[in-house]
Amino acid sequence: MFVDSVTIEVRGGSGGAGAEAFRREKGVPRGGPSGGDGGRGGDVRLRVDPGLTTLSDYRYRRHHRADRGRHGEGSNRTGRSGADLELRVPPGTIAFDHGTGAALGELVDAGHTLVVAKGGRGGRGNARFTSATRQAPRRWESGEEGEERIVRLELKLLADIGLVGEPNAGKSTLLARISGATPKIAAYPFTTLTPKLGVVELPDYRSFVVADIPGLIEGAHTGRGLGHRFLRHIERTRALAILLPLDDDDPAATLAGLRRELEAYSPGLAELPWAVVFSKADLRPGDEPLPATAAGVWGRWRLSAVTGEGVDDFLEGCWRQLHRAAATGTGAP
């Protein structure tokens, strides 16, 4: 099951209490204080694991608590600190404080970590409270409680090119054609229920990642259909390819509607480089002119994922666009 948003409860470990102890020493009141400090509680941290592609591990396991620190001991022995708790997440995970909505951080690169709940400080033992007027203190401190919060994790897939279109625009068929991905393909709307990733391999050891986003319909940004749940994923792509099937009665209106949905969800999406891809070219004669639509920022293609017509040209165009984006620093990070 693809899970791209979960809420978990995390708590750092409590710090250990300081000790009240006295050593035996001739001529020193009560032998002198020797109570050690308590150990620090462990942190709860997130760590990127490139082998993960979903947050499903946390769907039914919501409570996570780090190890507590051990209490201090006599002979000025400090208690052992609690072990940190690491929760592994896929690349592209963003952590939010569920209470305030504030972003805690984003995890992208392998091995990147983010502390979401700090452990409590250990309490001081009575040896720490010695003074000229109090040489045998009986004072000590309890350890601090660990930080506790509810964290919302959201996953944004990391892809170079995002395929966008209405249901049955041919996105899944194209993804299956150009990569090793195996999305569900059928002649009815909303066959793609979750985003799919595919790696495109070109000659000369070139490759890039393409994401098939579930179909958008009018009003998707307000929650209609399925695509609204996954619009966040195309915020991470470097460029968009908007698919318009050649059996569409009004491609220009469809394109305008898709552009409106992207802009309504996030102005940043509308600013991403985009191209128009006329899919299902096998349904129309090859010499028939393409429908009149606004030219895409980085190109227009006619292709058929069934016959392969125009697919290679489209992929080379994607590579050139990604190369330009890398050189100029444009596109999503």
Image: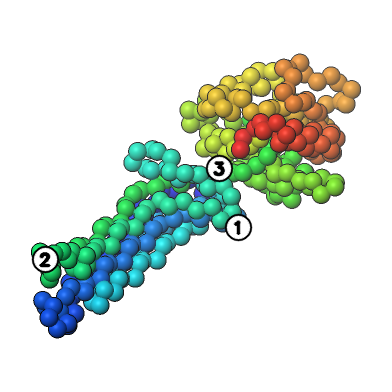
Mark 1 crowdedness (10 Å alpha carbons): few <14, some 14-19, many ≥20:
few
Decide if residue 188 is in sight here: no
Quarter of image, res 168: top right
Q: Secondary structure at mark 3?
A: loop
Mark 2 crowdedness (10 Å alpha carbons): few <14, some 14-19, many ≥20:
few
First in sequence, mark 3 or 1: give its number. 1
- Quarter occupied by the C terminus: top right
Q: Percent position (x, y) of residue 298?
A: 74, 26
* C-alpha distance separating marks 3 and 1: 15 Å
Residue under numbered circle 3: 156
At a point 84% along the width and 38% down the height, the residue shown is 312
Quarter of image, res 14: bottom left
At a point 79% along the width and 46% down the height, the residue shown is 206
Decide if residue 26 is in sight here: yes
> Identity of the amino acid at label 3?
Lys
Mark 2, mark 1: which one is toward the viewer? 2
* C-alpha distance separating marks 3 and 2: 59 Å
Give me the disc on residue 51: 1
Q: Secondary structure at mark 2?
A: loop
Mark 3, mark 2: which one is toward the viewer? 2
* C-alpha distance separating marks 2 and 1: 58 Å
> Identity of the amino acid at label 2?
Arg
Q: Percent position (x, y) of residue 229?
A: 52, 37
Give me the disc on residue 208: none
Q: Secondary structure at mark 1?
A: loop
At a point 10% along the width and 64% down the height, the residue shown is 133
Q: Percent position (x, y) of residue 134?
A: 11, 66
Question: Closer to the camera, 104 or 304?
Answer: 104
First in sequence, mark 3 or 2: give its number. 2
